[in-house]
Image (cartoon, rainbow, N blue to C red):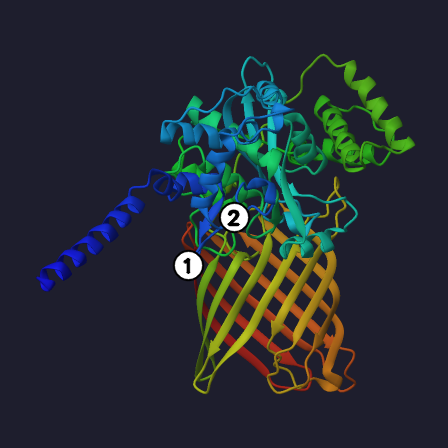
Amino acid sequence: MYSCLIRLLTFLILYSSAAVFAADLFDPIQSLSRTRHWQLLLHMDIGPSKWSSRVDSPEFFFSKSGKRDPDAELKSTIHHFQMPYKGDPNKHPLCRFPARRKFIEKKLNLKFSNVRCPDFEEWKKGINPVGVTLVFATSYPGNPASMFGHTFLRFRRGNKVNDLLDYGANYGANTDGSDNPLFYAVKGLFGGYKGSFSVSPYYQKVNEYGQIESRDLWEYELKLSASQIDLMISHLWELYYNAWLDYWFVDENCSYVLAALINVANPDWKLVDSRKWFVMPHDIVKKVSMQIPLRSIKFRPGVKKVLEERLEHLDGEQRDKFERLIDGKNVKSLKTDTLDAGLDYFNYKKMKQKGQLSKKENSLYQKLLVARSKRSDRGNLIFVPTKNRPDDAHQSSLLGMTVSHDKDKFSYFFTNEQVFKDWIDADKGYEPFSRFKAFGFTVKASELRIEFDNLNLVSATSHTPWNTIDASVSWEVNSGYRRVWDNRCDNCFPLELEGKVGLSFMSTHDSLFTLLVGGFGQAHGDLPDGHGAGWIVTSRMGHSANDKLKFFIEGNIKSDQANKNSDWYLDSTAGLTVSVERVGDIQLKTVVRKIKEGPEKIMHQLALNFFY
């Protein structure tokens, strides 16, 4: 009898436990909270053992644990949605979170109170979205933080004539404009700013990026349904009204957060599922163009690109007259195309100088306007070639292996760069000869040992060409730990900071010559007096034979002026790059190293690089 009672109790305990487990398993709220769509609305990632939202503003969550608990946030959201409202209806949770409302009502078959939301309804009516376009602005060499470009959204309005009257949605760092570009880049790399959304007329964005900064704009119009656009604009309101995130240039940046916003329209897309530590604008553009059907791809060249193309169409005589014209000299027999080039030049200068021309420049500009008004012909129609589409670019991270032969011995170098675009690799999809590398390392393996060869923090170069229309200075910054191979210490590994300025010359974006001069500083206990500092000169020549073949030569000469016994030392590299489209590249190099009083060292190298 006792054994029967024990069996009965055991059965009841197991049955009740199973019932509780089943109740939890089939709890519709908990099941819904674990769906990807709900987690996308919360901008929540799944870590090794827990969830965590990328949104940092407490106003975005109803539950105190909502940032890390999707179940608690869903329950709290439903509770707040059911609360009666008093006072300003715009502050009611149903008005603050219209996308969550649509999602919960559809998935749980609920119907909340019919609260009128004047602010949201007026805002949405003003935008009147019937289409969505992802816009990519090419790199801006004047700012290290913009070397990889920028993305934002354009909402196509119904019943409008000009697309410049559409609205643009931008996610960016909130700054007061007082930080210089270098300090801005450093703070942005380490989450020093808050990031949030802003909405403004599209013509303001075209003026800012295409005119003032002369960046090209690529417009990818997405093929979305009306319900998808409605959900996306509702979620944009939630972010615009309630949210801010810590802004990181290489992670929670403009592209990643915009991709998360787009992904809300369809949870089956995998726009923000990457496990990469760093996300670049090119990566997101490629993902969007591969996963979402496109209605069209349009190219809107910057004003500088139009001017450069116009000058390409001038013959030698008219080009000479154009150069004398902008120098303020009296020139006769100007063709219409030369007049148009002159007007474009002064418009470009006016935009670069924040809307101001000097008295002399303005006088010339007015004379050109009068002369052009007397011409009845239209001049040549300028067509800017649509090459270097950002979705054609290679991925922005690199894994590489290099085999190096020095006399009778071999060494092997293994490289990983989390953010990568070098001036010697393929330019397809990027600005010609652009260079930006961050958070990478190289390990050297030889017969004797395995050791770090370098640890790169941030390296960036602006090869902005010096020419008639733009007397721009090129610059370069490098930071990281590099192995020292000269006679100041025995293979020590100092922290090194380096800065250079100079001039670059580019021929039709196919050939580059640059000369940079600057200084460097090093710190390590094994260096004489624990540090080093001196001058450095860098010269580069490169030529792109086509999209797949590039030749290059680079030379660096350095001297540590802080060390009385230091010699100058030379490091030069010559070689070629063969690109395997989007996948990687193969490089053949010859490296020569020479210390003033030491032997010359020559290495032949074969590098295999893979982009991911």
98 lies above or below 180: above
- Residue placed at 13% from the left, 59% from the top? 5
For the point 60% across and 29% down, the residue is 168
Amino acid of disc 1: Ser
Q: Is mark 1 on a helix, strand or loop?
A: loop
- Near mark 1 (Cα within 10 A), the count class, few <14, some 14-19 or many ≥20, is few
Q: What percent of the width, then of the height, locates residue 563? A: 77, 83
The quadrant of the rendering that contains the N terminus is: bottom left
Q: Residue at x 71, y 47 (%)?
A: 142
Secondary element type, mark 2:
loop
Mark 2 vs 1, N-terminal side: 1
Mark 2 highlights which residue? 67
x and y, in percent, of residue 243 in the image: 60, 40
Decide which of 137, 154 is in the foreground and name it. Answer: 154
- Mark pair 2, 1: CA separation: 14 Å
Task: Determine whether, in the image, residue 254 is placed left or right of residue 322.
Answer: left
Residue 264: name its quadrant. top left
Asked whether residue 64 appears in the rendered view, the answer is yes
Q: In this view, does 377 lie above or below 136?
A: above
Q: Does residue 539 appear left or right of residue 43 in this picture?
A: right
Instruction: State left or right for residue 184 relative to residue 509.
Output: right
Of the numbered discs in the image, which one, if any, rests on residue 49?
A: 1
Q: Quadrant of the C terminus?
A: bottom left
Position of residue 595 in the picture relative to residue 230 (left or right): right
Q: Position of residue 71 (x, y in %)?
A: 42, 45
Residue 561 numbered mark, or none:
none
- Residue type at mark 2? Lys
Residue 429 in sight here: no
Residue at 74% in and 57% down: 502
Closest to the observer: 205 or 170? Answer: 170
